[in-house]
Amino acid sequence: MPHPLNSTLDQLNQIILGKETQIRLAVACLLARGHLLLEDLPGVGKTTLAHALAAGLGLKFQRVQFTSDLLPADLLGVSIYERNSNEFRFHHGPVFTQVLLGDEINRAPPKTQSALLEAMEERQVTIDGTTYPLPEPFFVIATQNPQTQIGTFPLPESQLDRFLMRLELGYPDAQAERAMLAGADRRSLIAQLGNDIDPATLPKAQAEVAALHVSGALLDYIQALAAATRSHADLAYGLSPRALLGLVNAARAWAWLDDRDYVIPEDVQAVFACVAGHRLPSRSSGRPDPRTAVELLQAVAVP
């Protein structure tokens, strides 16, 4: 029986060329009910990937350009007094969607960044004492430019921890770049995406992912990885329990994409760097080092 998301993955690979692993990780992040942070230089396809993912899965999509003057109300919505009804009426902001692209999230000040915390964790928004549920599924894809660029604000740890995965796309290889240069504009191809996904497919897939079996021995391995991060000499702190829960769910999603109903150590290893990397700041520099996650995988033995 063909995998229900095989056609979607194939279509995404036709738009974002030469990035099969990153695309699969992005889909796994959605299946695990997490949120995705894309960090890279401008122009490597971060926004295109977000838009293509939403279109390929038939999800409602909204894009917000984060700037230094963006206010929380611009994102969440605002209550406006209406004279005819003599009452305040809440006008929903762009956060009320299924896929929210926060473009260049680190160009907004911390107050605006923190407006997403409740939405990402609780999947709801509270305005003036009233709580409004967000659509299902709710998936935040945020892009950020390297912190060395002018006009950026570093994401606080509490915000970073809300992202299940952090990915870098990087430059395409020579063959993929040549195909891109010789072909049609990649964003124009998004409109041609065929959406043959039934609306019930994604919620069903997310439920199946959550139910995948994880053995006790595999949980021992995950806890050993966590212990290694917490005792590492050059790390300011290790992985939190929320990060470990995210790691388990991401490994389940990776296994599900391999059409298995159980998780193996290779699934954990496949997702570990993008789940743990941004949560492990160096004690000396204060910033995460991508090489640390790779070193930890090499140092911790599989039970």
Image: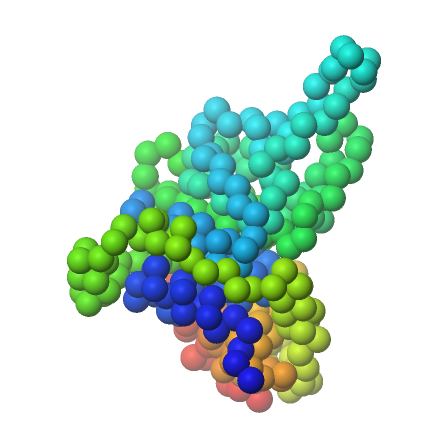
- Residue 56 is left or right of residue 136, and the answer is left
Q: Residue at x 64, y 29 (%)?
A: 77
The quadrant holding residue 58 is bottom right
Q: Residue furthest top?
A: 83
Q: Residue at x 40, y 36 (%)?
A: 152
User: Looking at the image, can residue 31 be seen?
Assistant: yes
Q: Residue at x 39, y 55 (%)?
A: 192
Q: Residue 82 at x, y = what percent?
A: 74, 15
Q: In this view, does 75 lie above or below 33?
A: above
Q: Residue 102 at x, y = what percent?
A: 49, 42
The quadrant holding residue 199 is bottom right
- Residue 56 is left or right of residue 124, and the answer is left
What is the quadrant of the C terminus in the image? Answer: bottom right
Number of dots carrying numbers: 0
- Residue 212 is left or right of residue 44, and the answer is right
Q: Which residue is drawn at 34% across and 59% down?
A: 15
- Residue 181 is left or right of residue 43, and the answer is left
Q: Residue 76 at x, y = what percent?
A: 63, 33
What is the quadrant of the N terminus in the image? Answer: bottom right
Residue 285 versus residue 86: which sits nearer the camera? Answer: 86
Q: Is residue 60 above or below residue 88?
A: below
Q: Which residue lies furthest to the bottom in this view?
A: 303
Q: Residue 290 at x, y = what percent?
A: 40, 62
User: Looking at the image, can residue 241 be seen?
Assistant: no
Colour scheme: rainbow
